[in-house]
Image (cartoon, grey):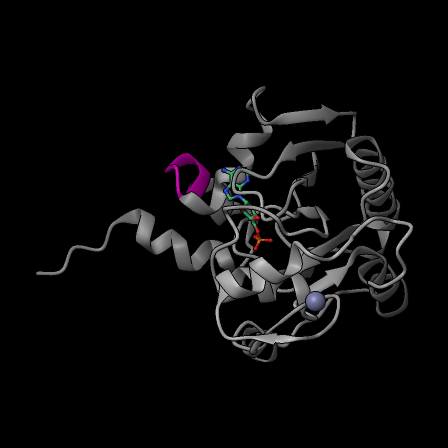
Amino acid sequence: MRIVTCAANFQVKSKAGNVREIIMAARFGHWSTGLLTSMNDPEMVVESDDKVVVIKDKYPKAKYHFLVLPKEQIPSLKALKPSQIDLLNHMHKIGKEIAFRADKDLRFRLGYHAVPSMSHLHLHVISQDFNSPCLKTKKHWNSFTTKYFVDSEDVIKAISSNGKWSVDSEKYSDLLKKDLRCHICDESFSTIPSLKGHIVLHDVSVSKKSL
Ligand code: AMP
Ligand code: ZN
């Protein structure tokens, strides 16, 4: 007889973004709710105010990698409403401040994964060096360097003009399988180590306009 645990069940359900299911998953300690745990862990929190919490990404994919999370329970991009535009703008502003404070000379991008793996809305604030031992796979690379990574400003524009964020998950999952290409010069690579050996040669400072 095959025993299906609650946790396995919640893995699928929490991706659907239903608040009640996410709270249940958090209660059972499912991995997809890890951000909720980190939001309450002083070791992980960088700063907070009445609306948001900024945490360090536990598996940073670049020299600096933060996540800005709303205190309000918002499961995902798909749950966003026009009334939350001010909050999205605030998250963006806080993200920019954190990036500037981390390294004002380094180029950063602020955005969301089109199809996130973790529950609770989170804005990635990531420096563009991608110099990190945690960046190990094609999926990691493509999730931050293809259109799978949606700029925060584009999400705000979409919610303002369409009233919601809608996504064709299949189209986005294909992006993760794309060939490896340097995000700066577009050169193609067959392996992650060769790509990583190449990107360290690029200058990703703000003053360079090559990105
Ligand atoms: P995604 O859901 O694809 O937008 O990305 C989730 C991000 O959360 C990844 O960059 C992970 O490295 C990061 N992450 C996973 N678990 C934790 C955790 N418990 N605390 C902080 N960051 C995490
Ligand atoms: Zn290059």
Which quadrant of the picture is home to ligand 1? top right
Please tell me which residue lies in front, 197 or 174: 197
Give residue 169's quadrant in the image.
Answer: bottom right
- Residue closest to the far top: 42
- Residue closest to the far front: 201
Quarter of the image containing the C terminus? bottom right
In the rendered view, tell whether residue 100 sits above or below residue 163. Answer: above
In the rendered view, tell whether residue 23 sits above or below residue 201. Answer: above
Please tell me which residue lies in front, 167 or 147: 147
Residue shown at the point (75%, 66%) measured from the top left: 184
Residue bounds of the magenta highlight: 25-30
Residue 27 part of the magenta segment: yes
- Residue closest to the far left: 1
Residue 164 part of the magenta segment: no
**Horizontal and vertical percent position of residue 93:** 87, 40
Give residue 25's quadrant in the image.
Answer: top left
Residue shown at the point (50%, 58%) measured from the top left: 15
Residue shown at the point (70%, 31%) measured from the top left: 53
**Horizontal and vertical percent position of residue 69:** 69, 39
In-image side of 155 versus 140 (left or right): right
**Horizontal and vertical percent position of residue 7:** 33, 47
Quarter of the image containing the N terminus? bottom left
In-image side of 111 versus 57 (left or right): right
State the count of labels.
Answer: 0
Residue shown at the point (64%, 33%) measured from the top left: 55
